[in-house]
Image (spheres, rainbow, N blue to C red):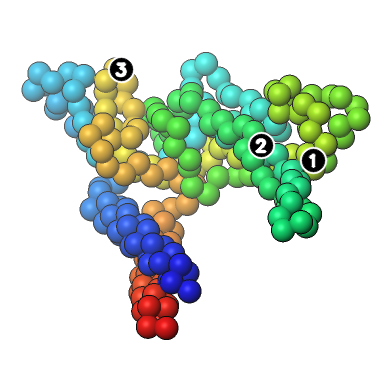
Amino acid sequence: MWIAGALLVVAAVAGFFYMRHTKSELHAMIGTETLSIPELERLRGISDELGAKGSFRKVAEVVGAAHPRPEGLLTSELSKTECVWYRYQIERQYETVEYRDGKRHRSKRTEQVANHTSWEGYALIDEQRRTIGVDPNGTKPDGVEQTVNRFEPYRGNDGSPVLFGFTLPQFVLGNNSTTIGYQYREWVIRPGRRLYILGEVHDRIGPLVIGKPENGGHFLLSTRTEQELRDDRVKRHKLLAVGVIAATLIGIVLVVADVLT
C-alpha cells in the first residue's frame, strides 16, 4: 500500500511543477504586448540608430497568417500535403510473450519507430502583406491540423519494407512475427492558417524573425487565439491544483496507514 502512496506523492510533486509552468505561461501571455509588424520594424529602426544593428531583441506576441519561405512550400512526408510546417510520428505495435510462474502471458506494447519535425522556417504575413520570419526551432505548435491518423496491419509474408507509402528501416521489420502493425500520425500547418506566436523577435540574420528566446523564456506557437490559450491555462491550473492536493493527501494517508499496520 505504501508503494501506491509514494507514487501518488511523486505524481503530486510532478503535477506541482507542471502547475507552476502553466501559471508562468499564463503570466507571460498577460505581461507581453502584442505588436504589429510595422511597430516591430520601428523599434528595430531605433535600435539601429543607436548603433546596435543586428542586436535587436524584443519579447512580443505576433499574430498573422502562415506564409511559405522564399524557397516555397514544404510537402509533408505521409499525406503529401503542401504546408509550411509538418510533423510525423510512427509507432510499432507488437505482442510479446513472457513466462511467469510457469504460465504464458501475452501483452501488447508500443515502440516509437520515427518522430520527425520539419526544421525549415516560414513566415507570418499580415493584412498589408508585410511579413516576419518564424524560426520553429523544433517546437510542437498547439492546435495544429492532423492529416493522418491511421493504423496499418503488418503483413510479414510479403517482405515489403514499405507501409502506407513510407519506407521503414529494414532492421525494424526483420522477421519479427510478433509485430501487429504500425500507427501513423501526421500534423501540418497549411499556408494561410492564422497563428498566434509569443517569442523573441530579433534581427540576427537581417530581417526580423520571431523564435525561441535566446536566454530562456516561453515560446508559444498556436492556431488558437491568445484568449483561448489563456482560458485553457486557467482551466488547466485549477484542475492541476485540485489534483495535486488530492494526490498528496491520499498518498500520505496510504503511506501512514501502511506504516501503522
| Towards the viewer: 155 or 32 | 155
Q: In the rendering, at what x and y percent does residue 185 appear?
A: 66, 41
Mark sitting earlier along the chain (3/2): 2
- Circle 1: residue type: Thr
Q: Secondary structure at mark 1?
A: loop
Q: Secondary structure at mark 2?
A: strand
Quadrant location of the C terminus?
bottom left
Q: In the rendering, at what x and y percent does residue 23 appear?
A: 30, 59
C-alpha distance separating marks 2 and 1: 17 Å
Q: Residue at x 39, y 54 (%)?
A: 226
Mark sitting earlier along the chain (1/3): 1
Q: Residue at x 26, y 31 (%)?
A: 214
C-alpha distance separating marks 1 and 3: 51 Å
Q: Secondary structure at mark 3?
A: loop
Mark sitting earlier along the chain (2/1): 2
Q: In the rendering, at what x and y percent does residue 153 appear?
A: 82, 41
Q: Which mark is residue 178?
A: 1
Q: In the rendering, at what x and y percent does residue 97 appear?
A: 76, 48
Looking at the image, the residue that sits furthest to the front is: 102
- Circle 3: residue type: Ile
Q: Residue at x 49, y 18 (%)?
A: 70
To which residue does mark 3 refer? 205
Q: Residue at x 73, y 22 (%)?
A: 170
C-alpha distance separating marks 3 and 2: 35 Å
Residue 115 lies in quadrant: top right
Q: Which mark is residue 90?
A: 2
Residue 78 lies in quadrant: top right
Graded by Cα atoms within 10 Å as few (under 14), some (14 to 19) or many (20 or more), the crowding at tag 1 reads some
| Towards the viewer: 68 or 100 | 100
